[in-house]
Image (cartoon, grey):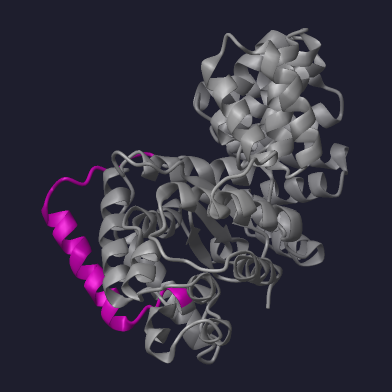
Amino acid sequence: MTKVRVVVTLLVFTFVILAPGWARPISFSDEEVLGKKLIKLIRKSAPLIEDGEILTYVNEVGQRLVDQVGVTPYKFRFFVLDEPVPNAFAAPGGNIFIYRGLLEMMSSEDELASILGHECGHIMARHLQRSIDEAKISSIGMLAGLIAGIFLGAPGLAAGGMAASQSAALKYSREHEMEADLRGLGYMSKAGYNPEAMPAMMRVLLHHTWLQNSNVPDYLQTHPATQERVLYLDELVKKERASGKFVRKPSVGNFKVIQTALIAGYSDEEKALERFRAGIKKGDSTAVYGLGRLFLREQKWGQAVVELKKAARLMPCDSFVLSTLAEALRKTGKLEDARRILESALSIDPSSAIAHYRLALVLMDLGKKDEAIENLTQIEELAPTFPDIDYQLGVAFGQTDKLGLAHFYLGCYYYHEDNSAAAIEQLKMAKPLITNSPSKLRKTDDYLNELVPKKKHWFSSRL
């Protein structure tokens, strides 16, 4: 059982212990509570990847898909888990988790979009809630078992809280999968991704199953895939192509570069070094980048600069490569060089979140706090998955004597980091100082009401 499975199992038993019964449908506000609790438990006990390049890239791909879902009550958030297994799941409240192992199996941004789009489809169709309703779940124990079955592929745990007749609800049904496929295919096609990537990704997962001697990948345990489903997806793609509506759009970034950053930052260092050196001999430019990224991980700043300069010469129009080079230059104290390169990266891709973040850090070091704040505020919506943005905003506002905003952003940072005491302290100091910002004041009150709960309905107050 992975660390993530242990964490979610703890969440399940939390439900069982704290709640005596369950007699009403799950509302959107209930989902939000469940989602927040799950995120906090995972942050505390499981290996989340919080690398700026990887996180901002996955979020940018995800948000490009979210832009196609239409009006939604959900605030979608995308997280990457540092587990070498091929898995992904949609949690309550619009939270989507994808594992490092699944990212490493992919070959393109389109395939990433196919998985994220499918999970968005499950959320928008409220499949978890529909499964609970269809199974006529009447107690929190049964609800917990169902959640465990869907997220973890843990029928043994589910059996403890569910009747045998409800065991079919442990996995998404064929109808749910087809609906998520159909929705996800529509999202990715409207977003300009190649819809053929969805059946292609499913073939990769099935092939992995065969290579592993029928050891079913985690993703297929909770999202059953069959050859029939692949053929069905092929037919959906043909119809999508025949409609003439598909228009290919440029990718958010270079998927191979991001995948290389993932390998350099999180896989076995010796194997990564061997892989990159072999790739360099074959003339693979991303392997040069990977070697530089590996040196960054090992804090060998000078060697990182040398290799990343080589990578930048090979890929001069890749904003992610330029951004990483700038980070290495910042580490060696070459701030003006780092600033110049980051400005070049943003001229290539003005929406690059990681370039804005790193430019803000450089500007802070140069004493240009207002310019740093300007860059950070452009990407602050990513803070729930990349809390360092809030932290840097708090520091920058503090250094410009805007104490209300400093306390507010530091409070948000500690809230996302699950440091309740520090969050409460900062938010209480912020409240009397941000009265001219209704949205921030409302957010402050929401967080304080959650962190310092008053007597409420058992569900919202006891979780």
* In magenta stretch: residue 290: no
Q: Nearer the viewer, residue 272 or 43?
A: 43
Q: Residue furthest front?
A: 455
Looking at the image, which residue is at 75% across and 34% down? 423
Quadrant in which the C terminus is drawn: bottom right
Say if 200 sits above or below 26 in the image: below
Which residue is located at x 50 percent, y 77 percent?
Answer: 149
Q: Hey, which residue is sitting farthest left in the picture? A: 243
Q: Quadrant of residue 277?
A: bottom right
Residue 336 visible in this rendered orientation of the protein = no
Is 245 part of what is drawn in magenta?
yes
Q: Is residue 369 left or right of residue 150?
A: right
Measured as percent of width and height from the top left, residue 37 is found at 62, 53
Establish if 206 lies above or below 399: below
Provide residue 8's location: percent of width, then percent of height.
Answer: 63, 67
Q: How many marks?
A: 0
Q: Quadrant of residue 401?
A: top right
From the viewer's perspective, tell me whether residue 64 is left or right of residue 233.
right
* Residue at point 58%, 21% (across, down): 440
x, y percentage for residue 83? 66, 66
| Magenta extent | 222-250
Q: Residue at x 68, y 60 (%)?
A: 82
Residue 251 makes an appearance in the image: yes
Name the quadrant of the N terminus.
bottom right
In front here: 53 or 443? 443
> Of residues 267 and 224, which is closer to you in this image?
224
Image vertical order of residue 170 relative to residue 288, above or below? below
Q: Where is residue 380 drawn, in percent x and y?
A: 58, 28
